[in-house]
Image (spheres, grey):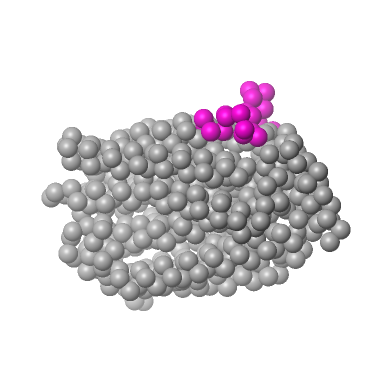
Amino acid sequence: MGAENKGADAVASEGGSDSKAFLATESLGRLMARLAIPTVVAQLVNLLYGIVDRVFIGHIPGVGADALTGVGVCLPIVLLIASFSAFAGAGGAPLASIALGNGDAGRANRIMANVVTLLVIFAVCLIVVFALFGRSLLGLFGASEATLPYAWSYLSIYLVGTFFVMAYLGLCPFLLAQGDSKYALIAVATGAVLNIVLDPLLIFVCGMGIQGAAVASVVSQGVSAALTVAFLRRKSSVFRVEARLVRPEGEIVRPVLALGGAPFFMQATESLIIVVLNGTLQTYGGDLYVGALTILQSILQLLFAPANGFTQGVQPIVSYSYGARLFDRVKRAAKRLIAVSFAFEFVCAVAVMLFPASIAQLFTEDAQLVELVGEVAPVFIAGMSLMGLQLGMQSIFMGLGQAKLSLAVATVRKIVLLIPLALVLPHFVGVWGVYFAEPLSDVLSVAFCSTLFLVNIRSILSERALEKVA
């Protein structure tokens, strides 16, 4: 209690000198709504980059089904590019927010400057690797002779926007870290709306087909990146990137990459999972089943996006309050975060299980594909009804700078459970084994994460643990 009073007094005394003190002083319910609503909307509109592409591509006359499957084969590489932005941005932003709560704006700026350097390095390396080996990788990822031309047409153009993806996905978390969720929304939403306008124009009116969808994505991402950088450079921002700060510092880079390891691992292994699932489905079912998985992955993204937006919006409150030693406020925010995340995921998962075919029709007019999705979606989606618990708890681990615990949760769900199950079960039940693997891994992973959270949360919310992070 003494530490908590000390933190509250420190925040109150800074008052006007700390423009972000509202993260520790404003009414919790009001602040959660203020920050979370824009981030939920931002997550949904950000999701439109991929979803809108797939909706329009799936309706290209004559070749829609093959083109949609081709884009689905590109998804592992698209996710991998995004995962490297999370490696730097999602790892650095919570640490910067904790530093701000601790009254150390200088360290917060050094963290963001190092993140900028990491994003540039990652972008250069990814462009070179995928430009040289992308076509071969698409074949390994499940592209057939019919779908490979569409996959490469999309990916070869999408790679041009790698720097843009890195900039807006890697730096938007720093807008959230200082409580500026509305600016993050504006940056992402502007690009998404532009993408919605450009997609039909380039795909159908200009006759560019799948290449038009890729061009629309690159242009839209460029606009989002430019706005993100502009908002971080405005006068009221606490972050100031100077040339002298951009030089990589080991004491900054190491904890950033350690904490960013969990979101990186979650997204990067998502690529590996899609590769495994696509390959298994191609072996046991063929292109139709790979196309169904593309739609199912899109549905999963729709399920995760709002909950991810909510947890990202609340996370800066957790991080800043933790740095300010307001441990009771952290506990109250954590309870609300977990409750809302669980309730939302449960309701949405049940809705998808009840009306899978109707949702599938948003992505394709192919009757066989719609029928297949209608059959397998209720099984594939079932475990998502509990995943809100894990999303909430893992976000809290991230917000409190707990790199090892976050990474453990990510590793167990993807590597220990889902991939082995997806490889083994089809030997016993055929193609349905792929669809059973997802809910089984989800349920077991939630149980593991809940155990870790209950065992460790008390010790994490202490002065001793904070000193190790800050």
Q: Is residue 409 above or below residue 137?
A: below
- 450 vs 11, left or right, is left
- Is 428 magenta? The answer is no
Residue 470 shows in this picture? no
Say which residue appears at 28% left-offset and 40% top-offset: 197
Q: Is residue 25 above or below residue 108?
A: below
- Counting from the top left corner in percent of width and height, residue 253 is at 66, 39
- Counting from the top left corner in percent of width and height, residue 44 is at 42, 52
For the residue pair 10 and 49, the one nearer the viewer reads as 10
Q: Is residue 194 above or below residue 308?
A: above
Residue 204 shows in this picture? yes
Say which residue appears at 64% left-offset and 25% top-offset: 242
| Quadrant of residue 32 within the rendered picture | bottom right
- Counting from the top left corner in percent of width and height, residue 23 is at 67, 49
- Counting from the top left corner in percent of width and height, residue 31 is at 61, 53
Taking the view exactly as shown, the residue that stands out farthest to the left is 62
Q: Main secondary structure of the magenta part?
A: loop
For the residue pair 394 and 331, the one nearer the viewer reads as 331
Q: Which residues are magenta?
A: 229-251
- Is 236 magenta? The answer is yes
For the residue pair 309 and 8, the one nearer the viewer reads as 8
Say which residue appears at 83% left-offset and 55% top-offset: 5
For the residue pair 237 and 248, the one nearer the viewer reads as 237
